[in-house]
Amino acid sequence: MFGSGLDIHLTVFFLSLIPSFEGRYALVFGIFSGLSPSTAMAVATAGILVLSIVLPQAFPRIDNLMFWMLKGGRRVRVKVASAYLNHVGKVRAKVRPYMDRYGIPGLILFVALPIPSSGIWTGALIAYLLGMGKYKSMIVLLTGGLLSNFITLSFTMLGFRLPA
């Protein structure tokens, strides 16, 4: 299927960075492409590690950009930045009760569940909207991502398949 073993490793790694696909499905792809389960797990986990570090660093930069745009003086930029910051404020207020109720374990579980619309990207966005600190977000995302990989690996190794 691929030209060399390195191609498979790189494909699994880059697939693990894609939203919704992430490490959990890159892992399965790697196994079915001929990688050993431990190698596929290691490569997919490298992608999870990258996302867990980069995303909590990247999302807050959006706020910084919007605050800079507010100072810019151009009406369009100020309107866009103001609308964005108001919307983020409303979303934060709306999701805060869920964080208060379920806390960090709830967010870890949300990231860990190998279902559509969950995962590291969505978890990072939620952590950002909740104003969770970068380092706490990194730990939550890494823990949830690793759990997701282990869940997916377990089902894959046990032979579970989705009905066609």
Image (cartoon, rainbow, N blue to C red):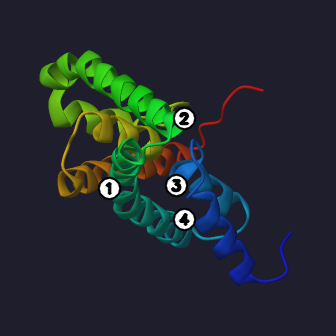
Instruction: For marks 4 and 1, give the CA distance.
Output: 19 Å
Determine the image quadrant of residue 85.
top left
For the point 34% across and 24% down, the residue is 86
In this view, the mark in front (1 or 2): 2
Q: Amino acid at mark 1?
A: Leu
**Badge 1: how crowded within 10 Å, few (<14), some, or many (20+)?**
many
Q: Position of residue 106 (x, y in %)?
A: 24, 30
Disc on the earlier residue, 4 or 3: 3
Q: Nearer the viewer, residue 12 or 28?
A: 12
Q: Callout 4: helix, strand or loop?
A: helix
- Which residue is under mark 2? 76
Q: Callout 3: helix, strand or loop?
A: helix
Q: Is residue 50 above or below residue 132?
A: below
For the point 49% across and 69% down, the residue is 38
Instruction: For marks 4 and 3, give the CA distance.
Output: 13 Å
Disc on the earlier residue, 1 or 2: 2
- Which residue is under mark 3? 23
Q: Amino acid at mark 3?
A: Gly
Instruction: For marks 1 and 2, give the CA distance.
Output: 38 Å
Q: Position of residue 129 (x, y in %)?
A: 31, 34
Q: Callout 1: helix, strand or loop?
A: helix
In this view, the mark in front (4 or 2): 2
Q: Nearer the viewer, residue 77 or 9?
A: 77
Disc on the earlier residue, 3 or 2: 3
Q: Amino acid at mark 4?
A: Pro
